[in-house]
Image (spheres, grey):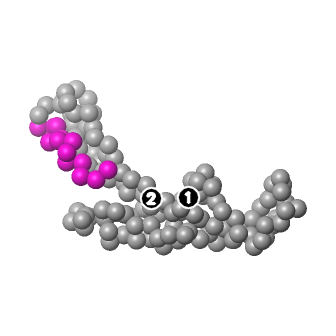
Amino acid sequence: CESASIIGIDPMNQGKLLQIQGWTFADTDLQDDRITCIQISNAMRLDRIVEMLQYEQIDDDEFELVWRRYPVDDEKYPEEYQTPSADNWVLPNKVYRPNTVMLGDFRLSRLQMHHLNRPIPFRLTIGIID
């Protein structure tokens, strides 16, 4: 594996396994279309992850409240442990990505962006949704 510069694409490196390093730059800011107070510059990905507090069955007659990213199948639960309605799932989970991310003169593929992504989570409270 050889090291190469991220500035200028050298045809002599065609077909070689190269090691390059540097800062990445995204072509657009990422903004959630529903939670408009969030705008992130120079990011490879913005995930909207929605969770709902629901009952989940532990054993035959024991239930506990848990946060889940998906509706719990509570159809067979006693009524007091059922989620009122799937309509309460106000926002779906969604992923936002820039069109292009560059590393110097090299354009990263979607697969490369996926593998390089290291999420930095933060939580929002109710009341900021448009």
SS at badge 1 = loop
Q: Earlier in the sequence, mark 2 or mark 1?
A: 2
What is the three-letter code of the residue carrying label 2? Tyr
Magenta segment main secondary structure? loop
Image coordinates for residue 99, horizontal then vertical, percent? 53, 62
Looking at the image, residue 129 sits to the left or right of residue 107; the answer is: left
Q: Among all residues in the image, which is located at the extreme left?
A: 80
Which picture quadrant has residue 4?
A: bottom right
Q: Among all residues in the image, which is located at the extreme right?
A: 12
Q: Which residues are magenta?
A: 80-92
SS at badge 2 = strand
| Closer to viewer: mark 2 or mark 1 | 2
Cβ–Cβ below 8 Å for labels 2 and 1?
Answer: no
Instruction: From the image, tell me which residue sits under label 1.
Output: 117
Which image quarter is the C terminus in? bottom left
Residue 115 in sight: no
Q: Residue at x 32, y 68 (%)?
A: 36
Which image quarter is the N terminus in? bottom right
| Structural distance between the alpha carbons of marks 2 and 1 | 13 Å
Image coordinates for residue 59, horizontal then vertical, percent? 26, 29
Mark 1 closeness class: few <14, some 14–19, many ≥20 residues within 10 Å: few
Instruction: From the image, tell me which residue sits under label 2.
Output: 96
Image coordinates for residue 109, horizontal then vertical, percent? 63, 55
- 91 falls in the magenta region: yes
